[in-house]
Structures are given as C-alpha cells and as structure tokens.
Amino acid sequence: HRVADLGPFGLIDAAATVSADRRRLAITLVNRAEDEPEQAGIVLRDTQFGGPVAIRTVTAERDRAQRALPDVAGVHQEEGTETTTGATVSLRLPPQSFTVIEAALTS
C-alpha cells in the first residue's frame, strides 16, 4: 500500500502537554505543507486560556545571501503573542514550520 492511499491526512501535526498542576499548557504544531500557510484553531475542554499565548515559530531561512556558511541552510525564528477568546485561539502557520505555543490556564 502507498501511504497516500490510506486516507486524506492533514498537513498539521500537533502534540500537547499540561503541567501537573494544570496551570500551564505547551502545544507544538508542525505545518508540513510545502508552499501554503495553514490555519489552526485550538479549542480547550474543561478549562480556558489565562490570557494571550506566547508563540515561537521556526521556518526555513528567508534570504540565502545572508548565510554564514554558503552550503549550510539556516532557519528563521519569530516570536510573538496571540490573543485568546476564552477556550479558543486561532493561528496562521507558515509553510514548513514548527511552532511552540505556551499558555497559562485558568482553574
């Protein structure tokens, strides 16, 4: 069997962990799309975000001319925050990116 024949697979992979006291949440998202950004919506159950979430995203380098070593590909990192609405947050994930979200949770 070919993997593609097994069904339509999403282009976003996700994993989440929560602290033992259920006050902190970390989510990792990988957008495997080669050329297109993807929208991701996160909806929590049984809790809510305790304010804006911190976001760090790593993508491929933006400008090959700025390479320190000509044959070694670089990366680009962006950091920021995203406003939440209760138990939801929406994000735009750049193509071929790895994103980490860190958030406080309400009790």
Image (cartoon, helix red, strand yellow):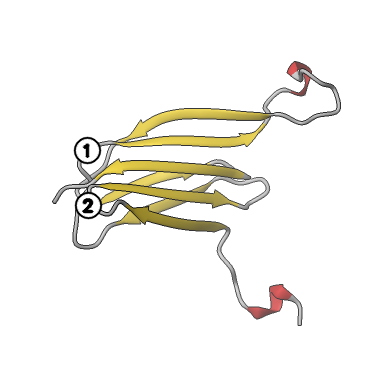
Residue at which label 1 appears: 51
In the drawing, does residue 18 fall left or right of residue 97?
Answer: left
User: In the rendering, at what x and y percent does residue 49 appear?
Assistant: 23, 46
Against 6, is 22 above or below?
above
Q: Closer to the N terminus: mark 1 or mark 2?
A: 2
Rendered image quadrant of residue 58: top right
In percent of the image, x 47 and y 49: which residue is there? 28
In percent of the image, x 63 and y 52: which residue is there? 33
User: In the rendering, at what x and y percent does residue 65 appear?
Assistant: 78, 18
In the drawing, does residue 35 fall left or right of residue 21?
Answer: right
Q: For numbered disc 1, what is the local secondary structure? A: loop
In percent of the image, x 19 and y 56: which residue is there? 47
Tag nearer the camera, 1 or 2 = 2
Which residue is the extreme one toward the right?
71
Q: For numbered disc 2, what is the local secondary structure? A: loop
Against 49, is 9 above or below?
below
Q: Nearer the viewer, residue 19 or 76?
A: 19
Position of the N terminus, as image quadrant, is bottom right
**On residue 66, which mark appears?**
none
Q: CA distance from mark 1 to mark 2?
A: 17 Å
Which residue is the extreme one toward the left?
107
In the drawing, does residue 11 fall left or right of residue 29?
Answer: right
Rendered image quadrant of residue 85: top left
Instruction: Indicate the amino acid at tag 1.
Output: Gly
Which residue is the extreme one toward the front?
20
In percent of the image, x 76 and y 77: which residue is there? 2
**On residue 21, which mark appears?**
2
Query: Is there CB contact under 8 Å for labels 1 and 2?
Result: no
